[in-house]
Image: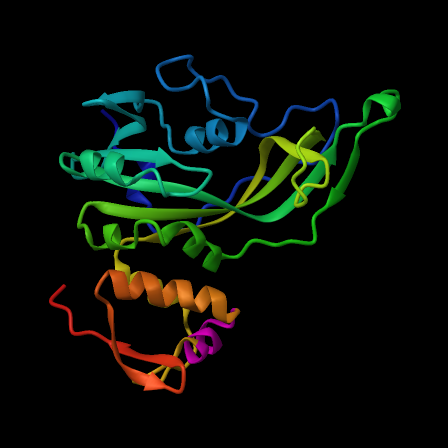
Amino acid sequence: MRACSEYARAGAQGHAPAVLYSPSAPCLNAVPVSNGIGTLNEGPLHQALKSLYRDADAQEEVAVGSYVADVMCEATDGDKVLYEIQTSGFSGLRRKLEHLLEEYRVVLVHPIAARRYIVKQPLAADADQPPKRRRSPKKGRLANLLDALVSIPDLLNHPRFELEIVLTSEEELRVPSTSRSWRRKGWRVARRDLLEVLERERFSSLDDLWRLAPGELPQVFTTQELADAMDEPRWLAQKLAYCLREGGAIEIVGKSGNALEYRRARRDR
């Protein structure tokens, strides 16, 4: 079996050609996918990301005990590597990942929309009108990986686990909804389409999370000082501190007013 090209380039940034929007043109994710086990509930974004990690000799929808992994390929050293695509949060993944890690290397792939275009399907009364498309002012950043990672931060201590973040340009189709959710104001997300891969970032250990805080940080610090080092809001710094603390990378050493003070913990690894 040919070595998995993506694993051989672990940690490298990946780029894909831009795709210009056209109502009649297929999106980047309009690729053939198998109708195997586990594909029934896959959205187009999930399918498109899976195709990025699938080389000619890779296997899809691989049964591992009672679970199904998205892609299996072979690394340059001959080891089998599983790629698990997760487009939403990680809260329900722990048991599956722990099971897969008993036997295989696992790369968890998670997209963050750095650029998003919103397309709204016309209401029934305006069915003869074309969809409205606009660029969302919200821009996802690498640090937003912490929103999902807080569910499983300690897994980054596992020697066979890696997390790959894919910064994307996406198109989000919204359709009218009967839901009373104030957040969507009468709309729901029907699908997400991948337009372009902007960057990939691989995290192979808990200590790699320090790359999210490249600024100066005192030996003893609060989450506000961590936020300054990250150049991010404090609520994101609090999530980074939680992940590092749960994984044993930092420890609480005191308080400054109402703020906890931390320092890096001594680690054997």
Q: Is residue 226 magenta?
A: yes
Q: Which image quarter: residue 175?
A: top right
Q: Is residue 163 left or right of residue 1?
A: right
Q: Which residues are magenta?
A: 224-232
Residue 242 forms part of the magenta stretch = no
- Residue 128 percent location from the top left of the image: 88, 20
Residue 212 appears in the figure:
no
Closest to the observer: 235 or 8?
235
Say whether residue 196 is left or right of residue 56: right
In the picture, measured across the screen, residue 63 lies left or right of residue 122, that is: left
Which image quarter holds the N terminus?
top left
Q: Quadrant of residue 246?
A: bottom left
Q: Nearer the viewer, residue 25 or 269?
A: 269
The quadrant in which residue 226 appears is bottom left
Residue closer to the observer: 194 or 222: 222
From what the image shows, is residue 179 above or below residue 169? above
Toward the front, the furthest residue is 180
Residue in view at x 49 percent, y 17 percent: 32
Report the residue at 53% width, 57% height from top: 141
Of 269 and 10, nearer the camera is 269
Residue 156 position within the rendered picture, expressed as x and y whole percent measured from the top left: 26, 53
Quadrant showing the C terminus: bottom left
Q: Position of residue 160 (x, y in %)?
A: 19, 45
The chief SS type of the magenta part is: helix
Residue 128 lies, with reference to residue 177, above or below; the image says above
**Residue depicted at 41% across the width and 49% down the height:** 148
Compared with 160, 32 (above or below) is above
* Residue under the image location 43 percent in, 77 percent down: 215
Count of picture labels? 0
Query: Is residue 126 visible to us here?
Result: yes
